[in-house]
Amino acid sequence: MTLVKGRDIIVVGLQALDSEIGSNCINIAYEFAKHNRVLYVNYPLDRNTIKLDSKQPLIAKRINMIKNREDNLLTVNDNLWEFYPTCILESANWLPSTFLFRLINKINNNRLANEIKKAITKLNFKDYILFNDSDMFRSFHLPELLKPKLSVYYTRDNMMSVPYWYKHGHILEPELFAKSDIVTANSTYLADIAKKHNSNSFYVGQGCETEAFDLSKITTVPSDIENIKRPIIGYIGALYKLRLDLDLIEHIAKSKPEWNVVLIGPEDDAFKQSPLHKLSNVHFLGLKDSKELPSYLACFNVAINPQILNEVTIGNYPRKIDEYLAMGKPTIATETKAMSIFKDHTYLGKTKEDYIDLIEKALAENTEQKQQERISFARSHTWENSVAEIYKAMLSTNKL
Protein backbone atom coordinates (compact mmCIF):
# COMPACT_ATOMS: atom_id res chain seq x y z
CA MET A 1 0.00 0.00 0.00
CA THR A 2 1.30 3.45 -0.96
CA LEU A 3 2.18 5.68 1.98
CA VAL A 4 3.49 9.18 2.54
CA LYS A 5 5.34 9.24 5.85
CA GLY A 6 7.02 11.76 8.09
CA ARG A 7 5.58 14.84 6.38
CA ASP A 8 3.87 17.92 7.80
CA ILE A 9 0.35 18.42 6.40
CA ILE A 10 -1.94 21.45 6.76
CA VAL A 11 -5.63 20.64 6.26
CA VAL A 12 -8.14 23.40 5.46
CA GLY A 13 -11.74 22.91 4.48
CA LEU A 14 -15.43 23.63 4.91
CA GLN A 15 -16.05 21.65 8.08
CA ALA A 16 -14.42 21.98 11.46
CA LEU A 17 -12.90 19.11 13.37
CA ASP A 18 -15.47 19.67 16.15
CA SER A 19 -18.37 19.47 13.69
CA GLU A 20 -21.47 17.68 14.96
CA ILE A 21 -21.75 15.79 11.68
CA GLY A 22 -19.19 13.63 9.93
CA SER A 23 -16.99 14.79 7.10
CA ASN A 24 -14.68 13.13 4.59
CA CYS A 25 -12.07 15.70 5.51
CA ILE A 26 -12.09 14.70 9.17
CA ASN A 27 -11.66 11.01 8.32
CA ILE A 28 -8.86 11.85 5.90
CA ALA A 29 -7.06 14.01 8.48
CA TYR A 30 -7.08 11.21 11.04
CA GLU A 31 -5.75 8.82 8.41
CA PHE A 32 -3.00 11.31 7.45
CA ALA A 33 -2.05 11.58 11.13
CA LYS A 34 -1.22 7.88 11.38
CA HIS A 35 2.07 8.55 9.58
CA ASN A 36 2.42 12.36 9.42
CA ARG A 37 2.06 15.47 11.55
CA VAL A 38 -1.24 17.19 10.75
CA LEU A 39 -2.54 20.67 11.51
CA TYR A 40 -6.34 20.77 11.06
CA VAL A 41 -7.44 24.37 10.53
CA ASN A 42 -11.03 25.02 11.52
CA TYR A 43 -12.92 27.63 9.54
CA PRO A 44 -12.57 31.23 10.75
CA LEU A 45 -15.70 33.22 11.55
CA ASP A 46 -17.05 35.93 9.27
CA ARG A 47 -19.03 38.96 10.40
CA ASN A 48 -22.43 37.69 9.21
CA THR A 49 -21.99 34.41 11.07
CA ILE A 50 -21.11 36.25 14.28
CA LYS A 51 -24.15 38.49 13.85
CA LEU A 52 -26.70 35.83 12.93
CA ASP A 53 -25.51 32.62 14.60
CA SER A 54 -23.76 33.75 17.77
CA LYS A 55 -26.00 31.59 19.97
CA GLN A 56 -25.17 28.35 18.20
CA PRO A 57 -22.85 26.33 20.49
CA LEU A 58 -19.95 25.91 18.05
CA ILE A 59 -20.07 29.57 17.00
CA ALA A 60 -20.33 30.74 20.61
CA LYS A 61 -17.29 28.60 21.43
CA ARG A 62 -15.25 30.35 18.72
CA ILE A 63 -16.43 33.82 19.76
CA ASN A 64 -15.39 33.05 23.34
CA MET A 65 -11.94 32.00 22.12
CA ILE A 66 -11.55 35.29 20.26
CA LYS A 67 -12.77 37.44 23.16
CA ASN A 68 -10.91 35.70 25.96
CA ARG A 69 -7.79 34.87 23.97
CA GLU A 70 -8.04 31.23 24.94
CA ASP A 71 -5.50 28.76 23.63
CA ASN A 72 -6.53 28.19 20.02
CA LEU A 73 -4.01 25.48 19.13
CA LEU A 74 -5.13 22.23 20.72
CA THR A 75 -3.50 18.80 20.74
CA VAL A 76 -5.82 16.03 19.54
CA ASN A 77 -3.23 13.25 19.57
CA ASP A 78 0.52 12.86 19.15
CA ASN A 79 0.34 13.72 15.43
CA LEU A 80 -2.79 15.86 15.12
CA TRP A 81 -3.48 19.45 16.18
CA GLU A 82 -6.71 21.41 15.92
CA PHE A 83 -6.38 25.12 15.21
CA TYR A 84 -9.02 27.83 15.70
CA PRO A 85 -8.10 30.99 13.74
CA THR A 86 -9.04 34.11 15.69
CA CYS A 87 -9.21 36.43 12.70
CA ILE A 88 -12.61 37.67 11.57
CA LEU A 89 -13.37 37.61 7.86
CA GLU A 90 -15.49 40.03 5.88
CA SER A 91 -18.76 38.63 4.51
CA ALA A 92 -18.50 39.22 0.79
CA ASN A 93 -20.46 36.58 -1.10
CA TRP A 94 -23.41 38.98 -1.46
CA LEU A 95 -21.36 41.23 -3.73
CA PRO A 96 -22.78 41.05 -7.27
CA SER A 97 -19.40 41.64 -8.89
CA THR A 98 -16.84 38.84 -8.84
CA PHE A 99 -14.17 41.51 -9.35
CA LEU A 100 -15.16 43.18 -6.06
CA PHE A 101 -15.53 39.79 -4.38
CA ARG A 102 -11.96 38.94 -5.37
CA LEU A 103 -10.65 42.07 -3.66
CA ILE A 104 -12.35 41.31 -0.34
CA ASN A 105 -11.58 37.61 -0.65
CA LYS A 106 -7.86 38.31 -0.99
CA ILE A 107 -7.97 40.36 2.23
CA ASN A 108 -9.72 37.43 3.94
CA ASN A 109 -7.14 34.98 2.60
CA ASN A 110 -4.30 37.11 3.93
CA ARG A 111 -5.89 37.22 7.38
CA LEU A 112 -6.31 33.44 7.44
CA ALA A 113 -2.81 32.81 6.09
CA ASN A 114 -1.26 35.02 8.78
CA GLU A 115 -3.10 33.02 11.47
CA ILE A 116 -1.98 29.70 10.00
CA LYS A 117 1.62 30.93 9.84
CA LYS A 118 1.53 31.50 13.61
CA ALA A 119 0.42 27.91 14.19
CA ILE A 120 2.95 26.32 11.86
CA THR A 121 5.71 28.38 13.48
CA LYS A 122 4.71 27.04 16.91
CA LEU A 123 4.68 23.49 15.56
CA ASN A 124 7.84 24.00 13.51
CA PHE A 125 6.19 22.66 10.34
CA LYS A 126 8.59 22.47 7.39
CA ASP A 127 8.14 21.63 3.68
CA TYR A 128 4.49 21.05 4.36
CA ILE A 129 1.70 19.76 2.16
CA LEU A 130 -1.46 21.87 1.87
CA PHE A 131 -4.65 19.79 1.61
CA ASN A 132 -7.75 21.85 0.78
CA ASP A 133 -11.16 20.23 1.17
CA SER A 134 -13.31 22.25 -1.28
CA ASP A 135 -12.66 25.62 0.44
CA MET A 136 -12.58 27.55 -2.82
CA PHE A 137 -13.03 31.03 -1.30
CA ARG A 138 -11.26 31.35 2.08
CA SER A 139 -8.34 29.22 0.90
CA PHE A 140 -8.14 30.35 -2.73
CA HIS A 141 -4.82 32.20 -2.27
CA LEU A 142 -3.22 29.86 0.29
CA PRO A 143 -1.01 28.09 -2.30
CA GLU A 144 0.72 31.44 -2.95
CA LEU A 145 0.56 32.81 0.59
CA LEU A 146 1.75 29.66 2.42
CA LYS A 147 4.04 28.37 -0.34
CA PRO A 148 3.56 24.66 0.43
CA LYS A 149 5.80 21.98 -0.99
CA LEU A 150 2.67 20.51 -2.58
CA SER A 151 -0.89 21.85 -2.86
CA VAL A 152 -3.79 19.40 -3.11
CA TYR A 153 -7.40 20.36 -3.83
CA TYR A 154 -10.03 17.79 -2.82
CA THR A 155 -13.46 17.89 -4.45
CA ARG A 156 -16.22 15.70 -3.01
CA ASP A 157 -19.48 17.42 -3.94
CA ASN A 158 -20.74 19.21 -7.02
CA MET A 159 -20.61 22.58 -5.29
CA MET A 160 -21.69 24.41 -8.43
CA SER A 161 -25.19 23.00 -8.00
CA VAL A 162 -25.64 25.27 -4.95
CA PRO A 163 -26.39 28.95 -5.77
CA TYR A 164 -24.21 30.25 -2.91
CA TRP A 165 -21.12 28.54 -4.31
CA TYR A 166 -21.96 29.02 -7.98
CA LYS A 167 -22.26 32.80 -7.73
CA HIS A 168 -18.49 33.36 -7.63
CA GLY A 169 -17.31 29.76 -7.48
CA HIS A 170 -18.04 29.00 -11.13
CA ILE A 171 -15.15 31.36 -11.86
CA LEU A 172 -12.87 30.77 -8.87
CA GLU A 173 -13.03 26.98 -8.48
CA PRO A 174 -11.77 26.21 -12.02
CA GLU A 175 -8.89 28.62 -11.36
CA LEU A 176 -8.14 26.82 -8.10
CA PHE A 177 -8.26 23.47 -9.91
CA ALA A 178 -5.71 24.79 -12.38
CA LYS A 179 -3.21 26.27 -9.92
CA SER A 180 -3.25 23.34 -7.47
CA ASP A 181 -0.46 20.81 -7.99
CA ILE A 182 -3.03 18.02 -8.02
CA VAL A 183 -6.79 17.65 -7.69
CA THR A 184 -8.29 14.60 -5.99
CA ALA A 185 -11.95 13.62 -6.23
CA ASN A 186 -14.17 11.06 -4.52
CA SER A 187 -16.24 10.43 -7.65
CA THR A 188 -15.33 9.79 -11.27
CA TYR A 189 -17.80 12.49 -12.32
CA LEU A 190 -16.02 15.17 -10.27
CA ALA A 191 -12.60 13.93 -11.36
CA ASP A 192 -13.63 14.39 -14.99
CA ILE A 193 -14.77 17.96 -14.28
CA ALA A 194 -11.43 18.73 -12.64
CA LYS A 195 -9.46 17.21 -15.54
CA LYS A 196 -10.83 19.92 -17.84
CA HIS A 197 -8.73 22.40 -15.86
CA ASN A 198 -5.89 20.29 -14.45
CA SER A 199 -4.59 17.14 -16.11
CA ASN A 200 -3.20 16.02 -12.74
CA SER A 201 -6.68 15.17 -11.44
CA PHE A 202 -7.32 11.80 -9.82
CA TYR A 203 -10.27 9.71 -8.68
CA VAL A 204 -9.30 8.51 -5.19
CA GLY A 205 -12.43 6.67 -4.09
CA GLN A 206 -14.27 7.05 -0.83
CA GLY A 207 -13.91 5.66 2.63
CA CYS A 208 -16.79 4.34 4.68
CA GLU A 209 -17.07 3.14 8.28
CA THR A 210 -18.52 -0.24 7.38
CA GLU A 211 -17.60 -1.89 10.69
CA ALA A 212 -20.96 -0.98 12.25
CA PHE A 213 -22.82 -2.47 9.30
CA ASP A 214 -22.06 -6.08 10.11
CA LEU A 215 -25.03 -8.41 9.88
CA SER A 216 -23.44 -10.91 12.26
CA LYS A 217 -23.49 -8.31 15.06
CA ILE A 218 -27.22 -7.55 14.82
CA THR A 219 -29.03 -9.10 17.79
CA THR A 220 -32.27 -7.12 18.05
CA VAL A 221 -35.11 -6.10 15.76
CA PRO A 222 -36.51 -2.57 16.33
CA SER A 223 -40.12 -2.67 17.52
CA ASP A 224 -41.44 -0.27 14.87
CA ILE A 225 -40.27 -2.47 11.98
CA GLU A 226 -40.65 -5.89 13.59
CA ASN A 227 -44.28 -6.40 12.53
CA ILE A 228 -44.07 -4.93 9.04
CA LYS A 229 -44.79 -7.66 6.52
CA ARG A 230 -41.99 -8.80 4.21
CA PRO A 231 -40.66 -8.14 1.67
CA ILE A 232 -39.44 -4.76 2.88
CA ILE A 233 -38.07 -2.37 0.28
CA GLY A 234 -36.13 0.19 2.30
CA TYR A 235 -34.33 3.50 2.14
CA ILE A 236 -32.23 5.19 4.83
CA GLY A 237 -31.26 8.84 4.53
CA ALA A 238 -32.61 12.37 4.19
CA LEU A 239 -36.05 12.39 2.57
CA TYR A 240 -35.63 15.54 0.49
CA LYS A 241 -37.33 16.24 -2.83
CA LEU A 242 -34.11 17.84 -4.08
CA ARG A 243 -32.41 14.43 -3.90
CA LEU A 244 -35.10 11.76 -4.17
CA ASP A 245 -37.70 10.92 -6.82
CA LEU A 246 -41.06 11.08 -5.05
CA ASP A 247 -42.97 9.82 -8.08
CA LEU A 248 -40.67 6.82 -8.36
CA ILE A 249 -41.24 5.81 -4.74
CA GLU A 250 -45.00 6.22 -5.19
CA HIS A 251 -44.87 4.10 -8.35
CA ILE A 252 -43.11 1.27 -6.49
CA ALA A 253 -45.66 1.31 -3.68
CA LYS A 254 -48.73 1.46 -5.93
CA SER A 255 -47.45 -1.09 -8.46
CA LYS A 256 -46.65 -3.67 -5.81
CA PRO A 257 -49.05 -3.35 -2.86
CA GLU A 258 -47.70 -6.66 -1.53
CA TRP A 259 -44.35 -4.96 -0.95
CA ASN A 260 -43.84 -2.69 2.04
CA VAL A 261 -41.77 0.44 1.49
CA VAL A 262 -39.93 1.62 4.61
CA LEU A 263 -38.42 5.11 4.65
CA ILE A 264 -36.09 6.13 7.48
CA GLY A 265 -34.88 9.70 7.86
CA PRO A 266 -35.98 13.31 8.27
CA GLU A 267 -38.58 14.65 5.81
CA ASP A 268 -38.74 17.98 4.05
CA ASP A 269 -42.11 19.67 3.44
CA ALA A 270 -42.53 18.00 0.04
CA PHE A 271 -42.30 14.55 1.61
CA LYS A 272 -44.49 15.49 4.56
CA GLN A 273 -47.24 16.63 2.18
CA SER A 274 -46.81 13.84 -0.37
CA PRO A 275 -49.43 11.17 -1.26
CA LEU A 276 -47.01 8.57 0.14
CA HIS A 277 -48.44 9.18 3.61
CA LYS A 278 -51.84 7.94 2.41
CA LEU A 279 -50.52 4.59 1.16
CA SER A 280 -50.94 1.70 3.59
CA ASN A 281 -47.77 -0.05 2.42
CA VAL A 282 -45.50 2.97 2.90
CA HIS A 283 -44.04 3.38 6.39
CA PHE A 284 -42.25 6.52 7.56
CA LEU A 285 -40.20 5.57 10.63
CA GLY A 286 -38.57 8.97 11.16
CA LEU A 287 -35.05 10.01 12.07
CA LYS A 288 -33.05 7.40 13.96
CA ASP A 289 -29.82 7.53 15.92
CA SER A 290 -26.93 6.46 13.69
CA LYS A 291 -26.20 3.56 16.05
CA GLU A 292 -29.67 2.14 15.37
CA LEU A 293 -29.46 2.20 11.58
CA PRO A 294 -27.73 -1.20 11.11
CA SER A 295 -30.56 -2.91 13.00
CA TYR A 296 -33.12 -1.36 10.66
CA LEU A 297 -31.10 -2.09 7.53
CA ALA A 298 -30.82 -5.73 8.61
CA CYS A 299 -34.61 -6.00 8.21
CA PHE A 300 -34.64 -4.85 4.58
CA ASN A 301 -35.07 -7.45 1.85
CA VAL A 302 -33.96 -4.90 -0.74
CA ALA A 303 -32.36 -1.50 -0.25
CA ILE A 304 -32.95 1.35 -2.68
CA ASN A 305 -31.47 4.74 -3.50
CA PRO A 306 -34.13 6.35 -5.73
CA GLN A 307 -32.23 9.50 -6.58
CA ILE A 308 -33.69 12.12 -8.83
CA LEU A 309 -31.16 13.20 -11.45
CA ASN A 310 -30.04 16.79 -11.15
CA GLU A 311 -26.84 18.77 -10.67
CA VAL A 312 -26.87 18.07 -6.92
CA THR A 313 -27.03 14.28 -7.19
CA ILE A 314 -25.42 13.32 -10.48
CA GLY A 315 -21.81 13.46 -9.34
CA ASN A 316 -21.94 12.68 -5.65
CA TYR A 317 -20.49 9.51 -4.18
CA PRO A 318 -23.41 7.73 -2.42
CA ARG A 319 -21.95 6.58 0.90
CA LYS A 320 -25.20 4.83 1.78
CA ILE A 321 -24.55 2.31 -1.01
CA ASP A 322 -21.46 1.09 0.82
CA GLU A 323 -23.54 0.72 3.98
CA TYR A 324 -26.23 -1.24 2.16
CA LEU A 325 -23.67 -3.53 0.54
CA ALA A 326 -21.69 -3.97 3.76
CA MET A 327 -24.71 -5.82 5.13
CA GLY A 328 -25.01 -7.88 1.97
CA LYS A 329 -28.28 -6.27 0.90
CA PRO A 330 -29.45 -6.41 -2.72
CA THR A 331 -29.37 -2.77 -3.78
CA ILE A 332 -31.17 -0.91 -6.55
CA ALA A 333 -30.05 2.61 -7.42
CA THR A 334 -30.53 5.22 -10.11
CA GLU A 335 -27.86 4.93 -12.79
CA THR A 336 -25.32 7.77 -12.74
CA LYS A 337 -21.67 8.06 -13.69
CA ALA A 338 -20.73 8.10 -10.00
CA MET A 339 -22.61 4.80 -9.56
CA SER A 340 -20.59 3.11 -12.32
CA ILE A 341 -18.03 1.83 -9.82
CA PHE A 342 -20.83 -0.16 -8.13
CA LYS A 343 -22.23 -1.70 -11.32
CA ASP A 344 -20.97 -5.24 -10.61
CA HIS A 345 -22.62 -5.35 -7.19
CA THR A 346 -25.80 -3.28 -7.56
CA TYR A 347 -28.78 -3.12 -9.88
CA LEU A 348 -28.85 0.18 -11.77
CA GLY A 349 -32.03 1.53 -13.30
CA LYS A 350 -33.13 4.59 -15.25
CA THR A 351 -36.93 4.46 -15.16
CA LYS A 352 -39.79 3.68 -12.78
CA GLU A 353 -40.39 0.47 -14.69
CA ASP A 354 -36.71 -0.48 -14.32
CA TYR A 355 -37.02 -0.24 -10.55
CA ILE A 356 -39.94 -2.68 -10.43
CA ASP A 357 -38.16 -5.18 -12.68
CA LEU A 358 -34.88 -4.89 -10.80
CA ILE A 359 -36.44 -5.24 -7.35
CA GLU A 360 -38.21 -8.39 -8.53
CA LYS A 361 -34.94 -9.70 -9.92
CA ALA A 362 -33.06 -8.85 -6.72
CA LEU A 363 -35.62 -10.66 -4.58
CA ALA A 364 -35.52 -13.72 -6.84
CA GLU A 365 -31.78 -14.18 -7.17
CA ASN A 366 -30.42 -13.14 -3.79
CA THR A 367 -27.96 -15.84 -2.71
CA GLU A 368 -25.46 -16.19 0.11
CA GLN A 369 -22.63 -15.98 -2.43
CA LYS A 370 -23.93 -12.68 -3.80
CA GLN A 371 -24.29 -11.37 -0.24
CA GLN A 372 -20.68 -12.20 0.56
CA GLU A 373 -19.47 -10.60 -2.67
CA ARG A 374 -21.30 -7.39 -1.78
CA ILE A 375 -19.85 -7.39 1.72
CA SER A 376 -16.28 -7.92 0.49
CA PHE A 377 -16.65 -5.14 -2.07
CA ALA A 378 -18.01 -2.63 0.46
CA ARG A 379 -15.30 -3.44 2.99
CA SER A 380 -12.65 -2.56 0.40
CA HIS A 381 -13.86 1.05 0.56
CA THR A 382 -11.87 2.05 3.62
CA TRP A 383 -10.35 5.40 4.47
CA GLU A 384 -6.99 3.68 4.51
CA ASN A 385 -7.43 2.68 0.86
CA SER A 386 -8.81 6.06 -0.19
CA VAL A 387 -5.96 7.95 1.45
CA ALA A 388 -3.48 5.52 -0.15
CA GLU A 389 -4.85 6.73 -3.51
CA ILE A 390 -4.36 10.33 -2.38
CA TYR A 391 -0.78 9.48 -1.44
CA LYS A 392 -0.26 7.86 -4.83
CA ALA A 393 -1.47 11.05 -6.51
CA MET A 394 0.84 13.15 -4.32
CA LEU A 395 3.87 11.04 -5.16
CA SER A 396 3.12 11.18 -8.90
CA THR A 397 4.19 14.85 -8.91
CA ASN A 398 7.77 14.04 -7.88
CA LYS A 399 7.64 17.01 -5.51
CA LEU A 400 7.90 14.97 -2.31
Image (cartoon, grey):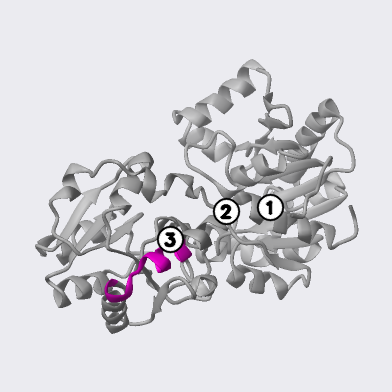
Give me the residue at 36% from left, 62% from top. Answer: 329
10 Å crowding of disc 1: few (<14), some (14-19), many (20+):
many
> Could you tell which of marks 2 and 1 lies nearer the N-terminus?
2
Query: Is disc 3 in contact with disc 1, using a CB cutoff of under 8 Å?
Result: no
Q: Position of residue 342 (x, y in %)?
A: 50, 70
Q: Which mark is residue 387?
A: 1
Give me the residue at 27% from left, 72% from top. Answer: 363
Q: Which residue is identified by label 2?
A: 207
10 Å crowding of disc 3: few (<14), some (14-19), many (20+):
many
- Amino acid carrying label 2: it is Gly
User: How much space separates mark 2 and mark 1, taking CA atoms?
Assistant: 8 Å
Q: Is residue 395 left or right of residue 63?
A: right
Give me the residue at 29% from left, 74% from top. Answer: 359
Q: Position of residue 349 (x, y in %)?
A: 38, 79
Quick one: SS at disc 2?
Answer: loop
Quick one: SS at disc 3?
Answer: helix
Image: magenta residue range: 363-374
Q: Which residue is identified by label 3?
A: 325
